[in-house]
Image (cartoon, helix red, strand yellow):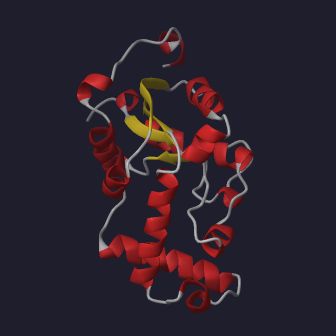
């Protein structure tokens, strides 16, 4: 097993985070936590590339459909009237399409973050997927108020500023998907001997 300080994860600042000028703030929060950014690039994603980033399995799309349907039911909205279907797979496909449109709507910044339990630490820093449920002090809690109900009713993706790998399997996949090995560098931070 590798040492916990060798953990690596992917963080992507989405188009809304870039357009709102939050790149520096997000990077600062990562670095202040004692994590290292060992790869960094601004880029414009193609629909084809984003299509490969998000899962295409029926299971994944039905799960997204279930979350969306629950959201509509929780707030008393008629999903069939608003989306034209109550089929979980079809709803999941719609939401996936909104995600692809959102992720290709402007430039993004991708980075590899390394450090002790980097996957979990970055997830804590960014907060839950839904900004409306994120605690103050997290990136999403401090800089976004978007909500799945508003996004679904507007037929768009949730504007939640960042993507962070959710677990080790995702991180391993995304490291290879978004970065070539030669794009990832490592270095020793001045405080490494003090913090670890």
Give the image quarter of residue 32: top right
Residue 114 in sight from this viewpoint: no
- Along the line of sight, the residue nearer the viewer: 17 or 136: 17
Q: Is residue 174 left or right of residue 16?
A: left
In the rendered image, the vertical position of residue 77 relative to residue 109, given as above or below = below
Residue drawn at (32%, 39%) of the image: 175
Give the image quarter of residue 110: top left
Residue drawn at (35%, 47%) of the image: 168
Extreme-top residue of the structure: 190
- Along the line of sight, the residue nearer the viewer: 188 or 95: 95
Q: Position of residue 169 (x, y in %)?
A: 31, 50
Residue drawn at (48%, 14%) of the image: 192
Q: Position of residue 134 (x, y in %)?
A: 67, 54
- Along the line of sight, the residue nearer the viewer: 112 or 178: 178
Residue 84 in sight from this viewpoint: yes
Give the image quarter of residue 187: top left
Q: Is residue 58 left or right of residue 113?
A: left
Q: Position of residue 69 (x, y in %)?
A: 55, 82
Where the N terminus falls, by quadrant?
top left
Q: Position of residue 123 (x, y in %)?
A: 53, 45
In the rendered image, the vertical position of residue 38 relative to residue 129, given as above or below = above
Q: How many marks?
A: 0
Residue drawn at (63%, 82%) of the image: 72
């Amino acid at each position: 097993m590798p040492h916990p300080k060798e953990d690596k994860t992917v963080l992507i600042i989405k188009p809304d985070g870039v357009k709102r000028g939050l790149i520096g703030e997000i990077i600062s929060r990562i670095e202040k936590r004692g994590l290292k950014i060992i790869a960094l690039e601004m880029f414009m994603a193609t629909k084809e590339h984003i299509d490969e980033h998000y899962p295409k399995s029926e299971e994944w799309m039905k799960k997204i459909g279930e979350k969306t349907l629950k959201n509509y039911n929780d707030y008393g909205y008629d999903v069939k009237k608003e989306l034209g279907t109550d089929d979980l797979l079809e709803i999941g496909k719609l939401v996936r399409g909104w995600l692809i449109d959102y992720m290709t709507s402007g430039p993004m910044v991708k980075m590899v973050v390394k450090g002790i339990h980097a996957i979990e630490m970055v997830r804590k820093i960014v907060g839950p997927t839904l900004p409306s449920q994120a605690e103050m002090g997290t990136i999403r809690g401090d800089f976004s108020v978007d909500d799945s109900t508003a996004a679904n009713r507007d037929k768009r993706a949730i504007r939640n500023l960042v993507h962070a790998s959710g677990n080790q399997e995702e991180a391993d996949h995304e490291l290879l998907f978004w970065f070539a090995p030669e794009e990832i560098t490592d270095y020793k931070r001045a405080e490494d001997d003090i913090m670890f």
